[in-house]
């Protein structure tokens, strides 16, 4: 990634002027949709929320002072339509949005998945922009309220309106606070592929698998479950925060000499050639569309594999130990239970 990929202050200033007076429709009022809608409104942008009357998002939007409408009405007068919907719903819900939007309106995506893997087909004349904040909606909202922001990725499709779409996208990024941190140009494909790979290899899949394997190794060796959980799961956040704040080398500098040597001694034995080959295969599965096909099959079947794993996990020893440990920490705001 070159420094030139970082959007300049001059570009942000021009986009801010072009974005003034625009109307934005935010379709979906979940974790991301709510944060985008609130930040946009607090920045003085005219926002219309689209949500179905029976959804939790509809009621939440009303509580937040919006007057939510059905999607077709919400986008009718919009300059920018933000699709804050799960990727798996895009194939069904995005085409009606495109039909209801004004011809000059730009459609905005929070992820590149549905465009990269052709769940939706965009006309050449339709401006489209990707704005992907690198964090959950709760963080996006809180950083905005704190006078800060989180970084975001920005991309456009090869449409006849690409320049206008990017200008609106950058104005959108500015209004939700991301330009306070930094906006980096990329492509729909690069965002989608790296996002999926990162989630699977480290952030979600790899982390979940490594935590469970380490916990089970200690318990099977006779160590107390609560001790095993504290060592292999509970302390992950403390190390992750150090990496986030200081980088990997900064994290190594902040931990004890024993932990530091343990890290440099163990990492090459855990991340061996066999693991690297599996990571390459995982990336290949993302790039060639195999993962997207498996996701489509899982979605169409009602999420059987996901539900089975979550049921098993909820009843497992590691979750029981985790609930006991979290009960010792009254400052945690995370609910102890989970839905299935």
Image: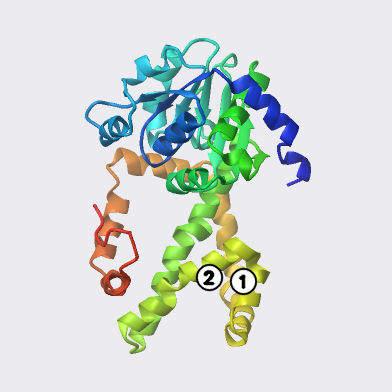
Q: Is residue 137 above or below residue 272?
A: above
Earlier in the chain: of badge 1 and badge 2, it is 2
In the image, residue 211 above or below residue 146: below
**Which is more toward the observer, 76 or 273?**
76
Residue at point 43%, 66% (across, down)? 209
Q: Viewer-proximal residue, 20 or 71?
A: 20
Say which residue label 2 marks.
239
Disc number for residue 197? none
The residue closer to the viewer here, 71 or 139, is: 139
Residue 225: image location, x then y, percent: 31, 81
What element does badge 2 sit on? helix
Q: Residue at x 29, y 69 (%)?
A: 319
Q: Quadrant of residue 94?
A: top left
Which residue is at the far bottom? 222
Q: Give how far across and how far down residue 113 sits, in percent.
A: 50, 37
Q: Position of residue 266 (x, y in %)?
A: 59, 80
């Amino acid at each position: 990634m070159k420094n030139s990929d970082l959007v300049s202050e001059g570009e942000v200033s021009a986009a801010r002027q072009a974005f003034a007076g625009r109307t934005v429709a935010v379709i979906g009022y979940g974790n991301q949709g709510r944060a985008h809608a609130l930040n946009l409104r607090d920045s003085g942008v005219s926002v219309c929320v689209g949500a179905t009357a029976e959804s939790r998002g509809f009621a939440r939007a009303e509580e937040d002072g919006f007057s939510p409408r059905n999607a077709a009405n919400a986008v009718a007068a919009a300059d920018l339509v933000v699709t804050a919907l799960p990727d798996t719903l895009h194939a069904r819900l995005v085409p009606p949005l495109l039909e209801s939007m004004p011809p000059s309106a730009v459609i905005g995506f929070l992820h590149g998945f549905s465009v990269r893997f052709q769940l939706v087909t965009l006309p050449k004349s339709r401006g489209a922009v990707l704005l992907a904040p690198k964090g959950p909606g709760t963080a996006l909202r809180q950083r905005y309220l704190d006078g800060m922001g989180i970084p975001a990725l920005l991309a456009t499709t090869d449409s006849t309106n690409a320049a206008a779409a990017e200008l609106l996208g950058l104005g959108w990024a500015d209004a939700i606070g991301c330009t306070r941190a930094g906006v980096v140009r990329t492509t729909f494909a690069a965002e989608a592929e790296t996002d999926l790979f990162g989630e699977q290899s480290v952030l979600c899949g790899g982390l979940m698998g490594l935590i469970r394997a380490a916990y089970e190794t200690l318990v099977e060796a006779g160590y107390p479950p609560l001790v095993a959980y504290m060592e292999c799961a509970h302390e992950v956040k403390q190390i992750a925060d150090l990496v986030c704040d200081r980088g990997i080398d900064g994290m190594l500098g902040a931990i004890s000499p024993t932990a530091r040597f343990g890290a440099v001694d163990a990492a090459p034995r855990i991340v061996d050639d066999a693991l690297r080959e599996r990571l390459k295969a995982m990336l290949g599965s993302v790039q060639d569309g195999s993962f997207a096909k498996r996701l489509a099959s899982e979605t169409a079947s009602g999420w059987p594999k996901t539900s089975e794993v979550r049921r098993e996990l909820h009843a497992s020893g590691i979750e029981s130990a985790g609930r006991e440990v979290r009960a010792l920490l009254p400052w945690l705001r995370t609910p102890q239970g989970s839905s299935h």
